[in-house]
Amino acid sequence: MSGWMSPANSSIPHSAIAAAPPGLVQAPSPAAFLKHPRTPPGGPGMDYQTADSEHLMKRLRTGQPDEMSSFSGSTHPANMYSPDDLPKTVVRNLSQGSNVMSMDFHPQQQTFLLVGTNVGDISIWEVGSRERLALKTFKVWDISACSMPFQTTLVKDATISVNRCVWGPDGSILGVAFSKHIVQIYTYNPAGELRQHLEIDAHIGGVNDIAFAHPNKQLCIVTCGDDKTIKVWDAVAGRRQYTFEGHEAPVYSVCPHYKENIQFIFSTAIDGKIKAWLYDSLGSRVDYDAPGLWCTTMAYSADGTRLFSCGTSKEGESHLVEWNESEGAIKRTYSGFRKRSLGVVQFDTTRNHFLAAGDEFQIKFWDMDNTNILTYTDGDGGLPASPRLRFNKEGSLLAVTTSDNGIKILANNDGQRMLRTLETRAFDGARGLSEAVNVKPIIGGPLGPIANVSSSASPIHERPDRIQQAMSLLGNMESSRVADVKPRIDTADKIKSWKSPDVSDSSHVKTLKLPDPQTPSKIVRLLYTNSGLAVLALASNAVHKLWKWQRHERNPSGRSSASSVPQLWQPPNGALMSNDLNDGKQPAEDSVACIALSKNDSYVMSASGGKVSLFNMMTFKVMTTFMAPPPAATYLAFHPQDNNIIAIGMEDSTIQIYNVRVDEVKTKLKGHQKRISGLAFSQSLNILVSSGADAQLCAWSIDGWEKKKSRPIQPPPGHLSPLVGETRVQFHNNQSHVLVVHESQIAIYDAQLECLRSWYPRDSLGSPISSAIYSCDGLLIFTGFCDGAVGIFDSDSLNLRCRIAPSAYISSSISNNNGNAFPVVIAAHPSDPNQFALGMSDGAVHVIEPSDSEAKWGGSTLQENGGALPSNPSSSALNSNNNNNNNNNNNNTQPSETPSR
C-alpha cells in the first residue's frame, strides 16, 4: 500500500488506527506507507498532491505496469505447489433450487458453505453430507423501522435478491446484503441455529457488497451501495460510525484490510474508479482507474501481502491483475480470458499461490507468479458462462455454481481425504446429530470461532433446525488452562487491601457451593467456559457436569458469580455427558482423566481412561471418538498454529502428535519414564513443555519435534532422593515462564527449564499441594492443599498473599460428614482475576471470591509464612502485561444501476 494513501493532516484520530495482528508482514518503513497526501473532496483548498503522486495517477490510468519498483517491501518464495494441489475433481452436487448469487465457506468449519440466492434466500450447507443445515427465506423483520423509500419500493416490487453473503471473521456472525436498501446480520450459534441480530436500512437502492472489519479492535460491518457511498456500522448495536462519500457512480465492492498498523478500505465503483479510505472523515486517499473501467472486485492473498483485482468492462473484456502496492501500479496482468466474457467474471485466491476465475463455462487457474494460465476445468460440464466460485479456507475444496441452480463441490487430494474421513467416522459410530437448542448467543467483543464436528454422507435433507458438524477442523480448541478473554485488571490505588491475610471465617469471603442433586463423585477436572458464563466439571465416574448462570436483576451480565446460584444444566432429553470407558470397565484412576474445551464453548474433548470423546456442549451428544486405549490418553493440548494438530499425553509416557483432519498420528515423542500429566505450548518460543508422573520436564521444538532439553524438577531442601508424582505445567501470559506444580512445591521455570523460584509447603500450609493455576491476569497463583486449605500467592515473588482455611468455604456439618474434603483441582475465571472455583474430593464444586467489602486477595504478603525460597533471582518479566496468549440522504428511490453479480 506504500504510496497509495496518506493522512490529509497529521491529526488522524486514534480510533481510525488499529494495531496489526501478530504475524503481519511489515513493510520496511511505516513512513513510506503514507507518502503521497491527497486533498479530500470538499476539504480545504490546500494542494497536498505532489508531482510524484500525480505521475503515479497518470501511469495507473494508462494501465502502465511499474516493473522497476519493489513490491510491498516483501519477497515471495518460490512456488512449491503443483497443479495437483488445486481442487478440480467433482465430489459433490448440491441442488439449491434458485440461482446462486453469492457463496462463502465458514472460516473454521471447512465443509460449511453459506449460500445466497436471487430470491433472497440464504442457506447453510454441510457439503460433505449434502445436508442443508439452515434455510432462511427473505422477509423484512421490522417494516416500521425501515425508511419510506424502501417501503415504497417493496410495495411497487416485492422481489429481492442477495447481492452478497459473507461470514464474520470467526464464523459466529454472518451478513447478507440485498438488492434493495437493507442488510441483515444473523448470529450463528453452535447448535446450527441462525438468530436475527441486526436489520439495517443501509443504502438508497441496492446494497452491493458487505464485509467485516476490525478498526480500533472493534468488529464493524462495511457496506456499499447504489447511492455512491460506503458506510461503516457497529456490529453490536448497528449504529452508523462513518459514511464515506466521493464516488460518482454506484459503489460495486469493498475490501477492508490493514497494513502495518493502518486500517483502511478499498472501494470500487462501476465507473472503474478505485478509492481508499481511512476510518476518518477526511475523504479518500486514492483515486485510480481499474482496468476495464466497470465492475471490479479486489482481494488480498491469504497472508495479506499481495493485492489482486478482477474486473470486466462493458464490452466484455476481463482483466485479472496484481497490484504493486508500493506505487499503486499494476505489477502483472494475467492472460487467458475469453475476448468477450459473457458476464462479470468472479475470482478468488487460495494458499497464497493460486488464483481462480470463472470464465468461458470453465474455472481457470493461475499461479500467482506466472501470467499464463496454469490449468482449467469444466467441472464435468453444466457450468454457466461466468460461474461464481469460492475456495474454502484451506484451499482443499472449491464451490462452483451450475447453470441448473445448483452447486458443484470440487476437491483436491486433501479435500477428498477429508471427506472420506468424515464419512468413515460417521459410519463407524458418530452417535447422533447436534440438535438446535434455544440458546441466545453472546454478541460483542471478540467472537469466538466455531469448532467442528463430524458429518456423514447422506441424501439431501431439509433440516434447518439441526446441524451436523465437520471434524475436519476442530475450531480453536484449547486445554482447560487457557483463557482468551482479556482480563479486567484493577489498579492498586482503587483496591482495598485485606486486613488479615489469613481467612478462616465465611464472612470474609463470598463462597457458593454449586447445586448438584446427583450422586456425588470426586471432581477430577474443572474449568470455566471461556465466556465466563459457566463451569464444567468432570467427575471420577466419567460424567461431566455443567453449571450455567442466568441473567437476572442481581446478575445482569449472566457471568459466573458466588452471589448468584447457577443451574445444573442438562438438555431436554435428560442425557448425561459421559466419557467412553475402556471395555466397559469402571473409570480408571483419577490421573488419566483429561479435558479440553473449544474457544467458543461449543464442544468439549474429554477422556476418562477410554477413547477420547468429542461432545456437543448444547446437546451433550457424542459426535465422534478416537484414540482407543491402550494406552489411554492422559492430557490434551492443541497446537497454537494448527488447530488440527493435538498433542496427546499418554499413559505409556509417550506424547502422540495427532492430526485430527486425517486421523493419523504424525509422530511420537519419547522422553518421560511415566505417564504424561501436563503439556503446555508457547507459540512465541515455538516449544512444547511436557511433564510427567516421573517429575521430569521436557522441552520440545514444535518445528521438528526434537527434544531440546530434559531435567527433573528440583527437590525441596533436604530431600535426597529424586521426586516422583504427578507434575503439571502452565505457561504464564508472557509465554516465557512456566508454572510447575508438584505435591512438594510450586515453582517458576524459564524456557531453558532452569528453576527461577520455588515455594515448598510449611507452617500453616504444610500439607501436600493438590493443584495450582495462574489467575487470568497472571499476577496470582491459586493453590490447593490436601488438607482443604487454599493459598493465594504472588506469581512473581511466590510470597503468600492470603491463606483461606477450609472453614471459610466448607460448612461445619458438611465437614463433619465428609471428613477431610480437599480441592483436587482449581480453575481460574477467564476474565475476573480474583474469582476461582474448587473441584473437591467429596464431589462438591465451590466458587470463591473476595467479600463485597474487599476487591482483591491479600494486599500485603506474609513474609514470615510464605517467604519464597529462590533458586535464582526472581524475574520481573513474569509480571509483564502481555496479552493472554496461553491458558489462556436522498429520499428518492431509484432503480439499481449496478450490474448483477
Image (tube, rainbow, N blue to C red):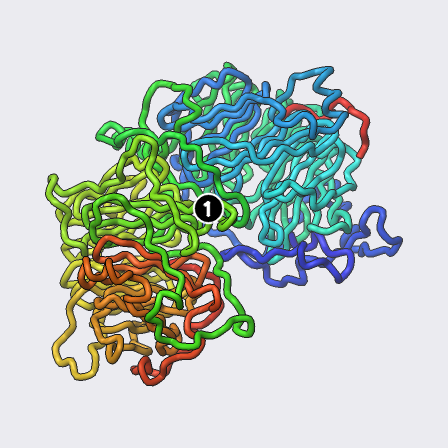
Element at badge 1?
loop
Quarter of the picture containing the C terminus is top right
Residue 824 vertical position relative to residue 608 in the rendered view, above or below = below
Image position of 645 (left or right of 271)? left
Q: At which x and y percent is residue 620?
A: 31, 37
Front one among 138 and 825: 825
Front one among 824 and 466: 824
Residue 291 vertical position relative to residue 791 in the rendered view, above or below = above
Residue 616 found in image quarter: top left
Q: At which x and y percent is residue 837?
A: 34, 58
Residue 874 seen from this side: yes
Q: Residue at x 78, y 41 (%)?
A: 246
Residue 157 found in image quarter: top right
Q: Residue furthest front?
A: 813
Q: Residue at x 20, y 68 (%)?
A: 696
Which residue is identified by label 1? 448
Image position of 511 (left or right of 725)? right
Q: At which x and y percent is residue 781?
A: 36, 68
Front one among 516 and 80: 516
Q: At which x and y percent is residue 275?
A: 72, 43
Residue 105 vertical position relative to residue 266 in the rendered view, above or below = above
